[in-house]
Image (spheres, rainbow, N blue to C red):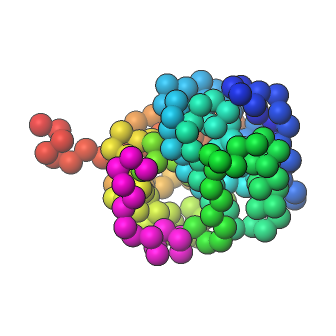
Amino acid sequence: MRIIAGEFRGRKLLPPEGDVTRPITDRVKQSLFDILTPLLPGARVYDCFAGTGSMGLESLSRGAGHATFFEADRGALLRLRRNIETLGCADHARVIPGDIFRWFASSPNAPSPASKANLIFLDPPYRFLREQPEKLRQLAADFAQFHLAPEGTVIFRHDARDALELSPLQQYDAREYGGMTLEFLHPALSPDDKQ
């Protein structure tokens, strides 16, 4: 695993151990970030189910202003913190350990408009779509209501065989790579916004 472009280009990241996380291939990551490039300068990024932090760290390398990483697995957390330390970007990063659903449920107050996320990577274990879809729907609702900037984007990665509507987020693009789908979502417009 490595950073593909930007300030930390070519720097290696500690990879995940075992099958707790599913790292994205360099080819897919390059394609994704080619699309996201205009959104990154100064962006506030949430890397949900971050694993060892590949997506958030790539964002920081390409000009994002801050990344918040959410991860529950202890082994992945150790490697995530080491990767942040190795790249020397701790001043632009925050790690939130533990259950992401519990954290968002206990943090209902909206951050200030300036500190809302511009870009959220939502990369849950694939089993969540089959076993706990209601939790992911609630997470999407929390994003839309409290944590995502009005012009923000959520990148939802999942098995191509699965589908889950994350209302009140609305899909505006989707790309399929092998057996994986990347959905691009933004807050749905209210009737007032459409006029």
Residue 98 coordinates in the image, percent (x, y): 65, 71
Give the residues in magenta.
101-115
The quadrant of the rendering that contains the C terminus is: top left
| Residue in the foreground of this view, choosing between 90 and 97 | 90
Quadrant of residue 99 in the image? bottom right
Query: Does residue 179 appear in this view?
Result: no
Residue drawn at x 59%, y 24% is: 34
Q: Is residue 184 above or below residue 142?
A: above
Q: How many marks?
A: 0
Residue 65 left/right relative to 141: right
**Based on the displayed image, in which of its 4 quarters is residue 127 positioned?**
bottom right
Q: Is residue 56 magenta?
A: no
Q: Return the residue nearer the eye: 28 or 46.
A: 46
Up-down: is 56 above or below 71?
above
Q: Position of residue 125 (x, y in %)?
A: 66, 59
Name which residue lies at 15% across and 46% down.
Answer: 191
Residue 110: in magenta span: yes
Q: Position of residue 192 (x, y in %)?
A: 13, 45
Let me know if residue 125 appears in the view.
yes
Residue shown at 52%/30% (left/top)? 41
x, y percentage for residue 65?
A: 55, 39
Quadrant (top left/top right/bottom left/bottom right) for the N terminus: top right
